[in-house]
Image: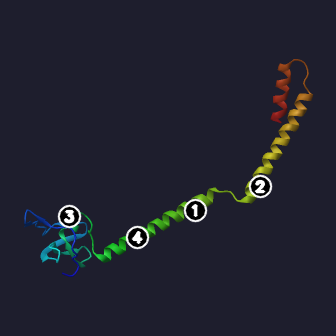
């Protein structure tokens, strides 16, 4: 039979399991075709897109096949497109948050300048200490706030 390959048997105590009218994913079973060369029951199914497919009952019941070839290709295409979009969005977020080399250098230069300014203010404050330690720390705080 075309479309039905020998795989898992569909017999249960020598009787066929009636799948007519049942839906598996996007496929609805219309009628029993017969047995394939391996003795497995094959069913004629119709997809929601109106394409037909001959499928072994065991493949339907076990979830191996749940749509026609056209819908399967479409689902694979959509999944790949969604993955590409997610990757693109992730790269965009990473690149957006990642500073450029020039921005990093500029930021480091600003930090170095701030450290030098702090050191300068600290030296000025310590040289102006008058009286007790407590007054010296008050003077230091005042100079650093400027």
Q: Nearer the viewer, residue 84 or 143?
A: 84
C-alpha span from label 4 to label 3: 25 Å
Q: Earlier in the sequence, mark 2 or mark 3?
A: 3
SS under mark 4? helix
- Residue 138: x %, y % from top left: 82, 24
Q: Which residue is mark 2?
A: 105
SS under mark 2? helix
Position of residue 101 relative to residue 78, above or below, is: above
Left/right placement of residue 48 relative to residue 39 reads right
Q: Check whether the beta carbons of the residues at disc 4 and disc 3 lie within 8 A of each other.
A: no
Q: Check whether the beta carbons of the residues at disc 2 and disc 4 lie within 8 A of each other.
A: no
Q: Which residue is mark 3?
A: 61
Q: Which residue is mark 1?
A: 92
Report the disc number at residue 78. 4
Q: Earlier in the sequence, mark 4 or mark 1?
A: 4
Mark 1 residue crowding within 10 angstroms, few (<14) / some (14–19) / many (20+): few
SS under mark 1? helix
Q: Check whether the beta carbons of the residues at disc 4 and disc 1 lie within 8 A of each other.
A: no
Mark 2 residue crowding within 10 angstroms, few (<14) / some (14–19) / many (20+): few
């Amino acid at each position: 039979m075309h479309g039905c390959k020998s795989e898992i048997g569909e017999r249960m105590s020598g009787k066929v399991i009636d799948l007519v009218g049942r839906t598996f994913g996007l496929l609805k079973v219309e009628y029993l075709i017969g047995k394939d060369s391996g003795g497995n029951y094959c069913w004629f199914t119709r997809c929601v897109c109106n394409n037909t497919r001959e499928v072994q009952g065991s493949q339907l019941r076990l979830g191996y096949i749940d749509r026609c070839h056209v819908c399967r290709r479409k689902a694979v295409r959509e999944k790949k497109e969604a993955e590409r979009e997610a990757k693109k969005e992730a790269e965009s977020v990473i690149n957006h948050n990642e500073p450029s080399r020039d921005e990093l250098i500029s930021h480091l230069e600003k930090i170095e300048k701030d450290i030098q300014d702090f050191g300068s203010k600290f030296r000025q404050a310590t040289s102006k200490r008058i009286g007790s330690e407590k007054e010296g720390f008050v003077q230091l705080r005042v100079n650093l706030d400027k």
